[in-house]
Amino acid sequence: MKPYLTGVGEGLLWANAQLKAQQGTPFFCDPDDVSLTTADYLAIIDSETKQSYVQPEYPIELLLLKGLQGRFPCK
């Protein structure tokens, strides 16, 4: 599970970087001084699962995206 989650997280970061490079609206605004790890992704998902909107069938990939958006909102 951890390698998969790392891949999902890295994919979201790369997709976000590509959006920024093309002058698009990023999914979230990750700070430059933070390097996210698998442990961070797990903590974000764990925190997100406690939110009221989450249902048992909610995809883990979307939980991570919504968690990153909540943790690193664009201002």
Image: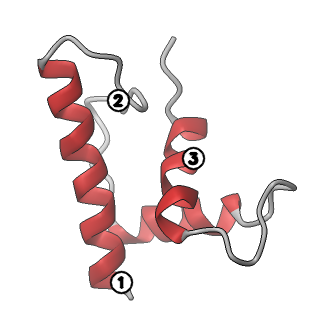
Residue 58 versus residue 10: which sits nearer the camera? Answer: 58
In screen coordinates, is 51 left or right of 44?
right
Q: CA distance from mark 1 to mark 3?
A: 18 Å
SS label for mark 1: helix
Between disc 1 and disc 2, whose residue precedes?
Answer: 1
- Looking at the rendering, in which quadrant would you find the N terminus? bottom left
What secondary structure is marked by label 2? loop
37 left or right of 46 in image: left
Residue found at the very far bottom of the displayed protein: 1
Amino acid carrying mark 2 in the image: Pro
Identified by mark 1, the residue type is Lys
Mark 3 sits on what residue?
66
Seen at 56% across and 39% down, the residue is: 71
Label 3 element class: helix
Residue 67: image location, x then y, percent:
57, 49
User: Circle 1 is placed at which residue position?
Assistant: 2
**Identity of the residue drawn at 52% across and 57% down:** 62
- Mark identifier at residue 31: 2
Residue at image point 33% right, 59% down: 9
